[in-house]
Image (cartoon, rainbow, N blue to C red):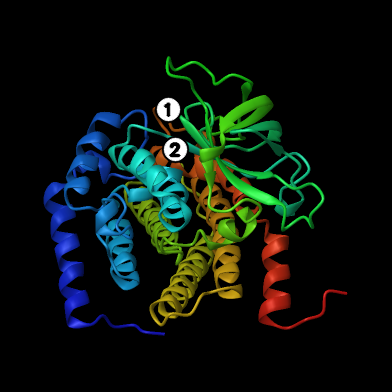
Amino acid sequence: MDFRFAPEEEAFRQEVRQFIESECPPELRSGGVSFFDQLPALVQWRRKLAQRGWIAPAWPKEYGGAGMTIMQQFIYNLETARLRAPSPLFIGGLAVAVVGPTLILFGSEEQKKTYLPKILSGEHIWCQGFSEPNAGSDLASLQTTAVRDGDEYVINGQKIWTTLAHMAHYMLLLCRTDPNAPKHKGLSYLIVPMKDEKGNPYPGITVQPLYNMAGTHEFNQVFFENVRVPAKNLVGEENQGWYMAVRTLDIERSNIGSAVGQQQSVEDLARFVQEARGSGQERVSHLPSLRYELAERWVETEISLLLSYRVVTMQNRGIIPNYEASATKLFSMELNQRIANTGMKVLGLYGQLARSQKWAPLRGRIEFMYLRSVANTIEGGTSEIQRNVIAGRGLGLPRD
């Protein structure tokens, strides 16, 4: 692994740091940023990033990005996380992380000109139509169909755990266009409008909310009943959707933002313990073992950082991470849960207070993390799937 930046990379790191320190509003760097509560400040920050092409740093300049190298992208994400500024993915979400890179790689020029500018401007929100009630970890077994009918596709089926579908203007849908082909070979990508020109639900689409344990409405289930979309909304070639989906890796995947955030959470817990004990407060647990537990969590955040460094070093050498990325995801998401458990021990009964409550320590972040992190080892590929990938592709173990 590479632990030192080249002189030009170090200069870029300093540029990013100075820009964030001078331009990012303090309220956005205080931790626990709420998208809705701090929307005006986020909009202003987004405009400043857009002027530099930093909303989508890895996109080519001709499509509004900064044309960054893999290492520059890594450095940008690293400094953004270290300074606790909202990342491009927090601001641009799925559209920047998934849709934009997919269209850049596989979309027609008409699709690029139509959708990319409004992704960068924030005018359009996108969702991703992947998981189904019976197709989660085994995504290639999905059953939502799209049948060609002249110049249109007719879509029928259901998607679940669809993030921000209730707000989205468009969906990037993975669907089955050849029911007779092997399951990986009969899938296609389609762009599906979620709203009509008046902002009403698109004909044939029904969105129902799904609330998570933390009480937030991120997820939805989406039903398609004879939904018609133009054939020109096909992305790339028909029946090649699976191969495009696994190629949607254009953005940096080192997980560095999560690793730095984990380290900051442990730092905040340790600082909270010190300050609470120094002031004579009795609301913090005084179990001697917590000192060692916090130290163990800190060591684990260092491991998470090293796994991220490994992935980005491979990418910088032109190597595509495979089981290495699975190992990073697996360790990081399970570490989120361990940090949340330790945090609840530190805070005691006060740890049950939510973000909206006056006496909630650390602005209620630990309570939210404790509830929200339960899903971390499920979403984006379960821990079981990641272990299978590591066992098969990393260790060469047989399937049976």
Please tell me which residue is depicted at 43% across the width and 71% down the height of the picture: 305
Q: Quadrant of the N terminus?
A: bottom left
Residue 360 image-quadrant placement: top left
The answer to which of 3 and 227 lies nearer the viewer is: 227
Cα separation between marks 2 and 1:
7 Å
In the image, residue 199 sits, relative to residue 48, either above or below, namely above
Q: Where residue 354 sits in the image (x, y, percent)?
A: 48, 32
Please tell me which residue is depicted at 33% across the width and 45% down the height of the picture: 31
10 Å crowding of disc 1: few (<14), some (14-19), many (20+): few
Q: Is residue 351 visible?
A: no
Residue 123 image-quadrant placement: top left
The answer to which of 378 and 351 lies nearer the viewer is: 378
Q: Is residue 191 visible?
A: yes
Checking the image for residue 128, the label placed there is none
383 vs 296, left or right, is right
Checking the image for residue 364, the label placed there is 2
Q: Three-letter amino acid code at disc 1?
A: Ser
55 vs 228, left or right, is left
Q: Where residue 132 sits in the image (x, y, percent)?
A: 71, 40
Q: Residue furthest right?
A: 400
Mark 2 vs 1: CB contact within 8 A: yes
Q: Across the whole image, how many numbered discs are drawn on residues?
A: 2
Q: Which residue is mark 1?
A: 356
Q: Where residue 131 sits in the image (x, y, percent)?
A: 67, 44
In the image, residue 224 sits, relative to residue 132, either above or below, namely above
Please tell me which residue is depicted at 14% across the width and 55% down the height of the picture: 19
Secondary structure of residue under mark 1: loop
Of marks 2 and 1, which one's residue comes earlier in the chain?
1
The answer to which of 374 and 45 lies nearer the viewer is: 45
Q: Three-letter amino acid code at disc 2?
A: Gly
